[in-house]
Amino acid sequence: MTHPLVKDPHDLASYTSLPQPFFSHDEGFYLHWTVGQKELYIEFEDDHRVSYVKMWGVNIEHEMETGYLDDVGFDDLWAWLTTNEPANVPP
């Protein structure tokens, strides 16, 4: 049986890091995952909203996307993070 975060135990590229939890300066709580050059932040905000940041580079205008989980499901974000598709392809 394989770990649910590893698609193929023989392929290190399929490994998905465990989330890195941390608190923000504005009392929110974040979970952060990294897979290759892709990064996903999920923030549990103090107003009970859940937002996300997808990053695949350093250019804020062209290599990052933000939104709320109300608009995009977690499954779509997870699929984007864990597939071998190019990083800039939207979910």
Image: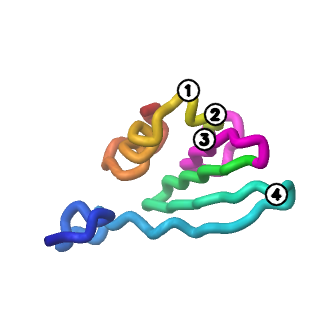
| Residues rendered magenta in the picture | 46-64
Q: Earlier in the sequence, mark 3 or mark 1?
A: 3
CA–CA distance between discs 3 and 1? 19 Å
Which quarter of the rendering shows the C terminus? Answer: top left
Front: mark 2 or 4? 4
Local packing at callout 4 (Cα closer than 10 Å; few below 14, some 14-19, many 20+) is few
Q: Which residue is denoted by mark 1 in the rendering?
A: 71
Q: Secondary structure at mark 2?
A: strand
57 in relation to 10, above or below: above
Disc 3: which residue: 63
Q: How would you rate the neighbour count of disc 1 (Cα within 10 Å): few for under 14, some for 14-19, many for 20 or more? A: few
Query: Could you say which is closer to the camera, residue 85 or residue 82?
Result: 82
Location of residue 81 with respect to 35 vertically, above or below: above
Is 5 on the left or on the right of 11, as rendered? right
- Mark in the foreground, 3 or 1: 1
Residue drawn where x is 61% and y is 37% of the image = 65
Residue 86 location, x and y as percent? 39, 42
Give residue 27's mark.
Answer: 4
Is mark 2 in CB contact (under 8 Å) with mark 1?
A: yes
Q: Is residue 69 magenta?
A: no
Mark 2 to mark 3 CA distance (whole Å): 14 Å
Name the secondary structure under disc 4.
Answer: loop
Say whether residue 54 is magenta. yes
Can you tell which mark lies on residue 23? none
Task: Give the amino acid at mark 2.
Answer: Gly
Q: Position of residue 53 (x, y in %)?
A: 62, 45
Report which quarter residue 26 is drawn in. bottom right
Q: Secondary structure at mark 1?
A: loop
The span from disc 2 to disc 1 (Cα, nearest Å) is: 7 Å
